[in-house]
Image: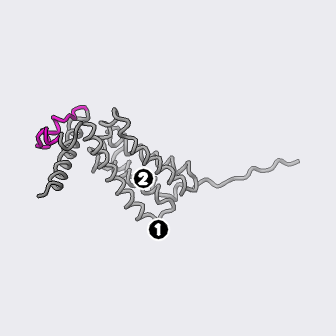
Amino acid sequence: MDNASRSERSRNAVIQAALAIIARDGPARLTLDAIARESGISKGGLMHQFRSKEAVLKALLEQQIEHFEALSRDYEARFAATRPEPRLAAQIATSRDAAAGSHVAALAAYGALAGQPDLLSASRQLDVDKVEAIKAEAADPDLALLRWTAARGLAITAVLGLCPFTDAERARLFDRLLDSRQWAPPAKTTKPRPSR
């Protein structure tokens, strides 16, 4: 195995170890020593790849951003011909996947980043770009943003274990958020003119 392959394998092992620690023990327990123990990589080998816990968190965040951006792109391509607001639908579907639990441990890493707001700037900028794209395609931008925000709220509360809904209720809410027919902008009404 060449050096680049070994290096990539070590990076992946570190990221998976960090995810395991965060999921099992919480973000406060994420240390370089804990990562070295969990990954089976010496602390020196770990520090060769990542100089600090913040560097591990940044790599973890970048991996998760790419994962969810790829999911979003796939959904958007699938919805482009069938949905009136494909970008919004893609974001709602991606939030639904995040809430489903398959990546809950990875999303919990965001909690570890709370003390590192500068590391979240790339994620914030992606959200700004998504919001602008959603507003640009929407017949009613405010309604579209409410749907996006509701989907994000469902996902975040599920990830944090704070969601008061059953899985079935949450799935039904996501289905409703995705159903554009239920979210038609209100018809404009004209006020009757006062008679003279």
Q: Which residues are magenta?
A: 28-46
Could you classify mark 2 by the number of other residues whose Cα lies within 10 Å: few (under 14), some (14-19), or many (20 or more)? many
Position of 83 relative to 173 (above/below): below
Of residues 8 and 123, the one drawn nearer to the viewer in this rendering: 8
- Position in image of residue 120 (x %, y %): 37, 40
Residue at 21% from the left image edge and 32% from the top image edge: 29
Q: Quadrant of residue 40?
A: top left
133 and 149: which is toward the camera: 133
Query: Of the residues shown, which amino acid type is indicated by label 1?
Result: Ala
Magenta residue check for 41? yes
Q: How is the image coloured?
A: one colour
Label 2: state its secondary structure: helix
Mark on residue 41? none
Residue 91 percent across, percent down from the top left:
42, 53
Residue located beneath label 2 in the image:
92
Q: Which residue is mark 1?
A: 81
Report the predominant secondary structure element of the magenta stretch.
Answer: helix
